[in-house]
């Protein structure tokens, strides 16, 4: 009788079900370039093909130097054990004539490693028609990673490759600055590959992305082709702390 009662208790439909732990818990720190056109939601949809996912976005649109000491950012950063923190919002000169300090980005990389998460730098695309800007931004982030090892999601370069092979493709929003749905999805594909180590090419087309199945396949192939030929993350020993653990 005791055994039967125990079984009946375990099988009650109103018992709470423990949620599966997320495979990836990703925090995005940045400004409008990492949030417009539902980029975080697109990334979440891609990562869910691997398993349970938690994605959160730091409040407000801020540069990385403005995130240091920001109360809302600090609270969210400390709210859980993140697996990856995406860092977007390094200041830079659109013309390439001026230089801005990178100490805030480097500080964030150190902080992310210190809590055991993987820092992922997000070099954005250039303004519409501003030739060479994406490459300059990529090189700026490579310099940051050379100083403080971090993964780099080569998003601006992926835009350049996509447009070079399909010149009529539109990735910018009407303002010539932010991403439209295609541009945001391409950024999400690159982030997906850097975070998971899995190819975006071959992922099933998803509804709700605001992008045709044909364009989804093309953009995913661009991300995979680029990352086959460009190392996104330094070796684990470079990301590891003094005790050998990932920091």
Image: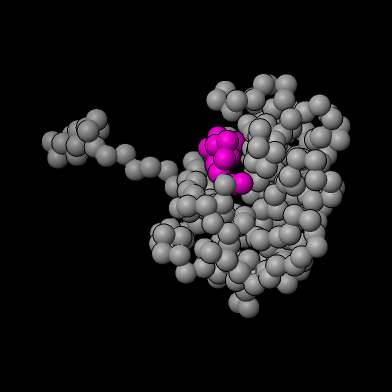
Left or right of 167 in this view: 73: left
Tell me the chief SS of the magenta region: helix
Residue 210 drawn at (x, y percent): 60, 25
The magenta segment: 33-46
Is 208 rendered above or below residue 58?
above
How many numbered tags mark residues here? 0
- Answer whether residue 106 is magenta in the image: no
In the rendered image, the residue lying farthest to the bottom is: 242
Q: Residue at x 50, y 43 (%)?
A: 53
- Answer whether residue 43 is magenta in the image: yes
Is 128 rendered above or below residue 182?
below
Q: Residue at x 73, y 44 (%)?
A: 127
The quadrant of the picture occupied by the C terminus is: bottom right
Q: Name the foreground residue: 208 vs 132.
A: 132
Residue 117 drawn at (x, y percent): 56, 61
- Display colour scheme: one colour
Left or right of 55 in this view: 244: right
Residue 35 drawn at (x, y percent): 55, 44
Residue 173 drawn at (x, y percent): 66, 34
Q: Residue at x 73, y 59 (%)?
A: 93
Q: Residue at x 19, y 37 (%)?
A: 9
Q: Name the foreground residue: 106 vs 23.
A: 106
Residue 15 found in image quarter: top left
Whether residue 243 is visible, yes or no, is yes
Whether residue 113 is visible, yes or no, is no
The quadrant of the picture occupied by the N terminus is: top left
């Amino acid at each position: 009788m005791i055994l039967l009662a125990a079984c009946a208790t375990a099988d009650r439909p109103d018992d709470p079900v423990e949620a599966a732990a997320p495979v990836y818990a990703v925090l995005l720190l940045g400004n409008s370039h990492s949030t417009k056109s539902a980029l975080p939601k697109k990334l979440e949809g891609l990562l869910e093909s691997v398993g349970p996912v938690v994605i959160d976005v730091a409040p407000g649109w801020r540069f990385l130097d403005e995130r240091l000491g920001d109360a809302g950012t600090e609270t969210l950063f400390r709210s859980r054990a993140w697996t990856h923190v995406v860092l977007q919002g390094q200041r830079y000169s659109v013309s390439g004539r001026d230089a801005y300090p990178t100490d805030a980005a480097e500080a964030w990389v150190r902080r992310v490693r210190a809590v055991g998460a993987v820092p992922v730098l997000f070099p954005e695309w250039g303004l519409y028609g501003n030739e060479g800007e994406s490459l300059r931004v990529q090189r700026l982030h490579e310099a940051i990673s050379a100083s403080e090892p971090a993964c780099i999601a080569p998003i601006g370069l992926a835009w350049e490759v996509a447009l070079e092979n399909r010149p009529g493709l539109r990735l910018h929003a009407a303002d010539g600055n932010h991403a439209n749905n295609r541009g945001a999805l391409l950024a999400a594909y690159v982030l997906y590959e850097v975070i998971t180590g899995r190819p975006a090419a071959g992922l099933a087309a998803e509804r709700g992305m605001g992008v045709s199945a044909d364009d989804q396949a093309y953009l995913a192939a661009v991300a995979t082709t680029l990352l086959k030929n460009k190392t996104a993350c330094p070796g684990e020993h470079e990301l590891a702390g003094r005790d050998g653990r990932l920091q």
